[in-house]
Amino acid sequence: MQEKIVILDFGSQTTQLIGRRIRELNIYSEIIPYNKYPYGKEKEEGIIGVILSGSPLSVYDKDAFRIDFEKLTGRVPVLGICYGAQLTAYNYGGSVESAPSREYGRAHLEFIDPECPLFHGIEKGAQVWMSHGDTITALPEGFECVASTSHVTFAAFQAPETMGQLWGVQFHPEVFHSTCGMQLLQNFAVDICGASRSWSAESFIETTVAELREQLGNDRVILGLSGGVDSSVAAVLLNRAIGKNLTCIFVDHGMLRKNEFTDVLRDYECLGLNVIGVDASDKFFADLAGVTDPERKRKIIGADFIEVFDAEASKITDARWLAQGTIYPDCIESLSITGTVIKSHHNVGGLPERMNLSLCEPLRLLFKDEVRAVGRALGMPEHLIKRHPFPGPGLAVRILGEVTREKVEILQNADHIFIQGLRDSGLYDQVWQAGVILLPVQSVGVMGDERTYERAVALRAVTSTDAMTADWAHLPYEFLAKVSNEIINKVKGVNRVCYDISSKPPATIEWE
Ligand code: XMP
C-alpha cells in the first residue's frame, strides 16, 4: 500500500498547494473532502498523517464544516492549518473570535518553543504568511502555545501528548511567502509522520507500468492524442507498459498551429508510438461555415471530433479501453461554500459508454509539474514537455466570428512569429500560455504610398499556475515592438497589432 499524507479539504484556495508541497518533498499526498475521511481505516489506506486545510468559513458559522476529532486523533499525527487549527482549538474548548482587523500578509515568528518538533530547524524571526479573519483567543486546557508573532499570540499550538500527536498553525506554511513553510511541512511529514520520501517520477513510472500491465493484460487500448503534454505523457507511459497494444489517434481539425500536425506526428513516431494521424479538416471547415456564435463553434467542433474519433476507433474492433491524459486537478473533488462536493471532470463526450470501453487514466494522480517530470524521466523531448496549453477547439476560438481556411492561415502565420519570437528571446518558458487572436475588425493603415484597410490582431500572453487565474505577461516593450513589426511586414492581410493587458478574472485567457 502506497503510504500517504491526507489533506482534508475545508474549501480553502490553498488546499491544492498543500498537496503539491507535500509531493515536492517526495511524499505522496491525497486531497479529500473533509466529510469523506475513511475513519479507522488508516492502516488499510496507507495514511500516515493528516493535514486539515484552511476554509473561507468561520468555525462558529451555523454550517461550518466539522469532522470527528475523537475518531481521528491518536491514530495518526494531525496538523491543522488556519481554519484547521481554529477548528481544532474550538473543538477542544478553546475560543475563536473574529479578529478586530483581518490578519493578512507577512508576519515574523517572535517566539518559538525550542522543544517543539514541528519547528525544528526554524529560527526565531522566520517569516510566515497570515490570512485569516478569525483568531484563536484562548487555547483548550492542556494545549501549549509553541509559536507567536507580534499580533498573533497563538500562531501555533500543540495538544497534550495524551491526545495523540496534534498541532495547529494559524499561518499558511504552504504558500511561497512563508519562508519556513517547507521546513515545517517536512518536520511534520518526515520527522513526525515518518514518511519515507520515496515518491518520485521514477518510482511512479515503475509502479504505474506494473499496475497497467496487471490491469490491461493483453487488451487493446485506444488513446486520443491532442499534441498537449498530458495526453502525450499518458501515451508514452502506456507505450512502455503495453507497447503495440496501444493505438493512438491524432485528429487534425485544421485549426492547429502552423505545421503542428506534421511536427507533432513526427515527434510521436520518434517516440515509438503506434499513432494514426487523421486529417479531417475538410469536415470541420464545412460544418463551421457561416457559424459565428462562440458556443456553437465549440459544440460543432466537439461533436465533429467525437464523430471522427469514433469512426477511427471503431476500426480497432477488439479494443477494450479508452485511455485519457486526465490529471489530478481534473479529479480533485472541490468544495463549494455550501459544502457540496463539485467534480469538474470531463471525459471525451461520453465516448467510453457509447463505444463500450472502460476508462484508463494513468496520470489521474499527478499534478501538472509531476506530469512533466514523468515525461522527462520517460525520455520525452523538452519541447513536447514544456509546450504551452492549447485549447481543444484550437485556433477556432481565437478567430472571432466565422472560421475559414484563409483566416486560419493568416492567424497561423502571425501566431508562428509570436511563438517563435518568444522562444528565440528565451521568454517562452516564462509565460504560461501565449497566442494571437484574429479580430473581426479592419482598420486603416499606410504601407509605402498605399492606404491599406486590413485586419487587426491581438497578442495574448499570460502568467499563471493553473489557468484558474492569470495575469497578462509583462513582456518587454522591445520584444513586443519586434513581433509587431514582423507580423505587419510578413503577414499579408494584417496591418495592426494590439497587446491584450487584461487579467483573469474578469477576462478569460481565450477570447471565445
Ligand atoms: P479560459 O479562456 O477559460 O481558459 O481562461 C483556461 C484554459 O483552458 C484552455 N481552454 C480550453 N482547453 N478545450 C480545451 O481543451 C477548450 O474548449 C478550452 N477552452 C479554453 C485555455 O487555453 C486555457 O489554458
Image: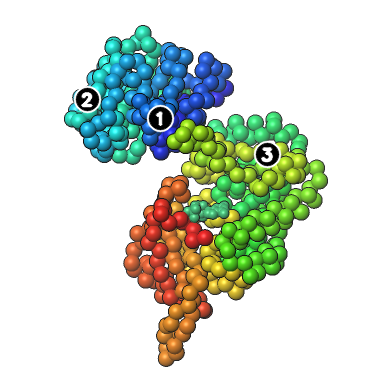
Q: In front here: 10 or 420? A: 10
Q: Is residue 25 visible?
A: no
Q: Residues within 10 Å of mark 2 (few under 14, many from 20)?
A: some
Mark found first going from the N terminus, 1 or 2: 1
Q: Quadrant of the N terminus?
A: top right
User: x, y percentage for residue 256?
Assistant: 59, 62
Residue depicted at x 66% and y 48%: 349
Q: Residues within 10 Å of mark 1 (few under 14, many from 20)?
A: many
User: x, y percentage for residue 241?
Assistant: 67, 38
Q: Secondary structure at mark 1?
A: loop
Q: Is residue 267 left or right of 92 when viewed as pictured? A: right
Q: Secondary structure at mark 3?
A: strand
Mark found first going from the N terminus, 3 or 1: 1
Q: Is mark 1 within 8 Å of ligand 1?
A: no
Task: State the residue position of label 1.
Answer: 53
Q: Is residue 297 visible?
A: yes
Q: Amino acid at mark 1?
A: Ser
Q: Secondary structure at mark 2?
A: loop
Q: Amino acid at mark 3?
A: Leu
Which of the 4 image quadrants contains residue 281? bottom right
Task: State the residue position of label 2.
Answer: 153
Mark found first going from the N terminus, 3 or 2: 2
Task: State the residue position of label 3.
Answer: 359
Q: Is residue 472 above or below residue 87?
A: below
Q: Amino acid at mark 2?
A: Thr
Q: CA distance from mark 3 to mark 1?
A: 31 Å
